[in-house]
Image: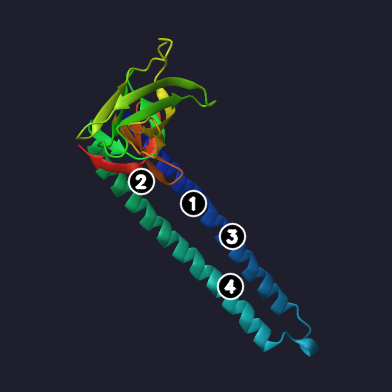
């Protein structure tokens, strides 16, 4: 509920910023119109403005006014769509979600990867690293006839427990002879909230925000 309230507040702030921008454009249009009126009132009768030039200016001003109206309508439509998406996404809270990407969210001291079935690669070399690229945990996982779920207990190879948050993982396959092979994996996590940030809708996994466009499946 807190995440939804935060996202709603973010939406309101974005709408206020858009309204302020529209007000500025409208103010500029009024300034342009005032300048044109002043120019017409003070022009030299013996050297009046070229009718074609005046028409072009009026057309330009009309286009600005139409753009203001169009922007307002478009922003209203976007706000409605984002509000609907936010409400719909709230149904994912509390459910296990599968995501693409290299970010591994550590939640309540645990994180999970879904590894593919065994093929040319019979094992997977999994590494978890921090923001500095330091390897925190490295493990070889045997692959089976069905997808394998690898669970990280949030500890380093030395046994130090790490805080919840976003970490980065990498996976590479290993053949029977130990040769490195390309391999992909997906992330499993329990959604704890929904957040809209900079017009991007995110799912929260504890303190970690991942984009809705990364969702592969929902259990």
Tell me where residue 65 appears, x and y as whole percent: 52, 69
Q: Is residue 194 above or below residue 142?
A: below
Q: Earlier in the sequence, mark 2 or mark 3?
A: 3
98 sits left or right of 177 in the view: left
Marks 1 and 3 in Cβ contact (< 8 Å): no
Q: Earlier in the sequence, mark 3 or mark 4?
A: 3
The reply to whether residue 184 is in sight is: yes
Q: Residue at x 66, y 82 (%)?
A: 54
Which image quadrant: the C terminus? Answer: top left
Q: CA distance from mark 1 to mark 3?
A: 14 Å
Crowd tier of the residue under label 4, counting other residues whose Cα lies within 10 Å: few below 14, some 14–19, many 20 or above: some
Q: Is residue 206 above or below residue 90?
A: above
Q: CA distance from mark 3 to mark 4?
A: 12 Å
Q: Which mark is residue 18?
A: 1
Crowd tier of the residue under label 2, counting other residues whose Cα lies within 10 Å: few below 14, some 14–19, many 20 or above: few
Q: Which mark is residue 213?
A: 2
Q: Earlier in the sequence, mark 2 or mark 1?
A: 1
Q: CA distance from mark 2 to mark 1?
A: 25 Å
2 sits left or right of 16 in the view: left
């Amino acid at each position: 509920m807190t995440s939804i309230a935060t996202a709603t507040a973010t939406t309101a702030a974005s709408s206020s910023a858009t309204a302020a921008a529209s007000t500025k454009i409208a103010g500029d249009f009024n300034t342009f119109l005032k300048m044109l009126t002043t120019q017409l009132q003070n022009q030299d009768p013996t050297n009046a403005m070229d009718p074609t030039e005046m028409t072009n200016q009026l057309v330009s001003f009309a286009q600005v006014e139409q753009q203001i109206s169009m922007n307002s309508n478009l922003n209203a439509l976007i706000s409605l769509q984002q509000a609907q998406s936010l409400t719909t996404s709230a149904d994912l809270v509390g459910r296990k979600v599968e995501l693409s990407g290299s970010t591994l969210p550590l939640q309540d001291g645990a994180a999970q990867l879904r590894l593919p079935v065994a093929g040319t690669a019979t094992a997977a070399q999994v590494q978890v690293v921090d923001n500095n690229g330091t390897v925190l945990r490295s493990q070889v996982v045997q692959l089976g006839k069905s997808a394998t779920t690898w669970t990280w207990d949030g500890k380093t190879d030395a046994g130090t427990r790490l805080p919840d948050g976003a970490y980065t993982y990498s996976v590479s396959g290993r053949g029977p002879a130990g040769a490195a092979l390309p391999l992909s994996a997906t992330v499993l996590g329990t959604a704890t909230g929904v957040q809209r940030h900079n017009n991007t809708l995110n799912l929260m996994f504890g303190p970690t925000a991942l984009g809705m466009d990364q969702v592969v499946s929902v259990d």
